[in-house]
Image (cartoon, rainbow, N blue to C red):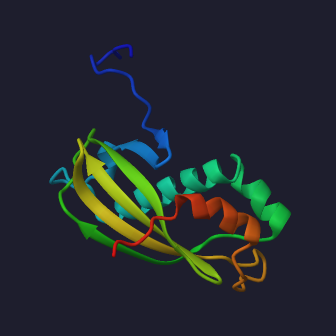
Amino acid sequence: MEANRFGAAEEPMQYVRSYRPFVLRQTVKWSDCDPAGVVYTGRFVEYVTTAFRAFLAQILDGNIEAYVARFGVDFPAKAISFVFESSLRPDDRFDVEVRVAGIRNTTFECEFVGTQDGKPCFTARMTTICVVPVARQAMRVPDGLRARLEPHLVKAAG
């Protein structure tokens, strides 16, 4: 990596660190933070949805929109929840691991584990519902999508 004019090493603001498990490295921007210098709570939704879209793009051969058009299915969030372990500050780099936690009839659930230097900073769960794009009506998770999600399914302990 080369140093930029400020002396910091150049690193992309986000990039995929691992495909299995799927891990997206992200960097906190100054604009993500409040005057106290910690990330606004609402920005975590963007971090999670960015990781989700990157994960979907990877399992759908790089083009989510082409998949939506071809198979007539879209993937809006139905529910999102968070648990915060520690704060993030400007220029912090953190990883978000995406795990498929469950696949149901019309929905699938992903778990997101945010870590910084190997230490947990947040976890999130997002339930995504499959819908017909224009009608916005729920539809069954397509078999092809189910097949692409299943290898990432994390079995519950117990």
Answer with the quarter of the image where residue 90 lies: top left
Q: Position of residue 48 (x, y in %)?
A: 43, 60
> In the figure, 43 relative to 83: above or below?
above
Q: Quadrant of the N terminus?
A: top left
Relative image position of residue 128 (x, y in whole percent): 56, 74
- Residue 27's place in the image compared with 152, above or below, is above
Front-most of 136 and 138? 138
Residue 127 location, x and y as percent?
Answer: 50, 76
> Can residue 40 be seen from the camera position used here?
no
In the visual, does 59 lie left or right of 143? left
Q: Residue furthest left?
A: 36
Judging depth in this view, the residue of 58 and 2 nearest the camera is: 58
Q: Residue at x 27, y 52 (%)?
A: 33
Quadrant in the picture for residue 114 = bottom left
Q: Residue at x 32, y 71 (%)?
A: 82
- Label count reads 0
Residue at 64% over, 70% down? 75
The correct choice, above or below, for 74 with respect to 24 in the image is: below
Rendered-image quadrant of the C terminus: bottom left
Examine the rendering and report whether any part of residue 124 can be seen: yes
- Taking the image as shown, residue 61 lies to the left or right of residue 4, namely right
Tell whether 61 sits left or right of 35: right
| Residue toward you, 53 or 35 | 53
Residue at the far right in the pictured view: 70
Which residue is drawn at the image coordinates 28% and 38% (left, top)?
91
Q: In the figure, 82 relative to 61: above or below?
A: below
